[in-house]
Image (spheres, rainbow, N blue to C red):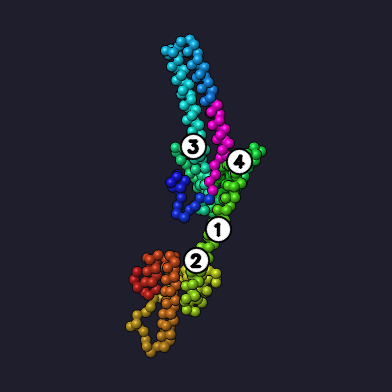
Amino acid sequence: MGYIESNLVADEEILYTGRKHVVLMLGQIITEMILIGLTLVAFSVVSMVFTKYNMTQNTLQVIVYGALGLATTVLVVSGVLDYLKWYNDCVVITNMRMMRFEGVFNRHMVESVLDKINDITLNQTFWGRLFGFGDVTVLTAAESGIQEMRNIAKPLEFKQALFLARSLQDEVGQADNDSEHHVVDRHMDDAPAHERNRADEYGDDNNHVHGLQQAIDDADGLAPTPPHGNEDPNDAQDEVIDEAAAEERETILRQLEILHAKGILDDDEFNTKIQRLYGKDA
């Protein structure tokens, strides 16, 4: 597993990976190769001179050979580092966020979730349009603010991938909302008619969750069930009131169970509401 993959979370997929245009990295490496070639030529010339004048044991020969060998080594290492820097400096777009990676030995990552991205601008010079690279600036609402990717290869593909990722996230969010409403509607369809009417009072037909949430407040505000010993069997009006209160509590109980099943209420909150509903000590 690579470094980028190790930063992914569950259900996160890479949609796009972009780097600086390879021509910029090759330009540096070609320059270093030319310098290495010149160093080797100088090494050959110096070797011929030393051989011609029988200077094989001369201290100067050791110094010159050592300097040329060191220069060659430095140029080779520099070329390898240029490649590693080009490879590790990248931007990754997933179905959840945009990540920018930099550094060879010390790694640095900046990320922005997709819904925090506000605007994208693209700038291409004449040479950028000719070779297919450009500067992309992403304005976000996150703490990082502005992220600028300079000389990125195929910047239009980067921009399109970012728009695609945001569209996919919007579709997933809409699907989750539809699924949530479907679950609530299914529970309400199985409930008695008077419970469905009560849910409609708290919210419109498209959002029963708000109506169910109101049941929490009702559980807090509804008076506890009076003990059976305090009931007056001769008072018909009190019996009607008690029956209405019991029916009301039954309705709220079913709605609290729905909220608990959906995870809106945890176990402690659910038990507390039930205890308050029936007048028990928490």
Name the spot of residue 234 as percent of width and height, x first. 38, 89
Left or right, residue 182 beside residue 122: left
Q: Nearer the viewer, residue 262 or 80?
A: 80
Three-letter amino acid code of the residue under disc 4: Phe
Inspect the image, locate mark 1, and give the three-letter code of the amino acid beneath it.
Asp
Is residue 61 in the magenta section? no
Please give the residue where the numbered disc 2 appears in the rendered image.
Answer: 180
- Residue stretch in magenta: 16-34
Q: Are marks 2 and 4 in contact (CB under 8 Å)?
A: no
Report the front residue among 275 and 197: 197
Residue at 47% x, 46% y is: 4
Instruction: Work out how far the residue at label 3 is from the one at label 2, CA to CA, in angstroms.
Output: 47 Å
Q: Earlier in the sequence, mark 4 or mark 3?
A: 3
What residue would you read off at disc 1? 170
Q: Nearer the viewer, residue 55 or 210?
A: 55
Q: Residues within 10 Å of mark 2 (few under 14, many from 20)?
A: some
What residue does disc 4 label? 133
Residue 198 lies, with reference to residue 122, above or below; the image says below
Most common secondary structure along the magenta stretch: helix
Q: Is residue 32 magenta?
A: yes
For label 3, the residue is 84
Q: Work out how far the residue at label 4 is from the one at label 3, CA to CA, in angstroms.
A: 19 Å
Residue 10 in the image, given as x and y percentages of width and height: 45, 54
What type is the residue that disc 2 sits on?
A: Glu
